[in-house]
Image: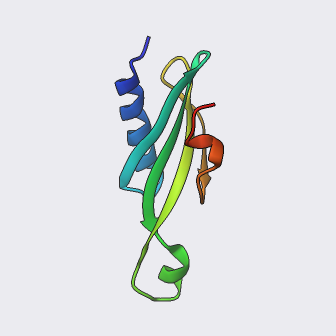
């Protein structure tokens, strides 16, 4: 059985390795059945401004990550904003 701290560290490592994000914070982590569901907040350079040649500005983005029972990432999804259901108790 995995501890919540191990899952948090796994999610942060995964996001840092697979996205341009380096400033990563897990803002929600909960266990549902055998899976862990995480919501991650990060800041990334705004690709539009970068493409236009302007100085980079950080843009706030969110990722949802699902970790299976064997500490395996089974899905992740990028969001541009936080859904209401992601930050409150259900």
Up-down relation of residue 59 to residue 64 (above or below): below
| Number of marks in picture | 0
Image quadrant where one finds the N terminus:
top left
- Picture residue at 42% right of the left edge, 76% below the top: 57
**Vertically, is 65 above or below 80?**
above
Here the colouring is rainbow
Query: Residue 58, percent across and down?
Result: 42, 70
Which residue of the protein is positioned furthest toward the front in this rendering?
89
In front of the other: 50 or 35: 35
Image height of 14 relative to 79, above or below: above
Picture quarter with the C terminus = top right
* Residue at 57%, 39% in the rendered image: 88
Nearer the observer, 90 or 16: 90
Residue 55: horizontal and vertical position, in percent?
39, 85
Residue 44 position in % (x across, y down): 44, 64
Q: Most extreme residue toward the bottom, as rendered?
A: 53
Q: What is the quadrant of residue 68 in the picture? A: top right
Q: Residue at x 55, y 79 (%)?
A: 48
Q: Is residue 8 above or below residue 43?
A: above
Furthest-top residue in view?
1
Quadrant of residue 76 in the image? top right
Identified at 52% across, 88% down, the residue is 52
- Measured as percent of width and height from the top left, residue 50 is found at 48, 80
């Amino acid at each position: 059985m995995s501890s919540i701290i191990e899952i948090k560290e796994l999610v942060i490592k995964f996001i840092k390795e697979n996205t341009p994000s380096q400033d990563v914070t897990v803002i929600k982590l909960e266990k549902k059945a055998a899976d862990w569901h995480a919501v991650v907040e990060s800041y990334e350079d705004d690709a539009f401004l970068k493409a236009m040649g302007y100085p980079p500005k950080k843009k706030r983005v969110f990722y949802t990550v699902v970790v299976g029972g064997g500490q395996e990432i089974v899905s992740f999804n990028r969001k541009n904003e936080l859904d209401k259901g992601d930050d409150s108790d259900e």
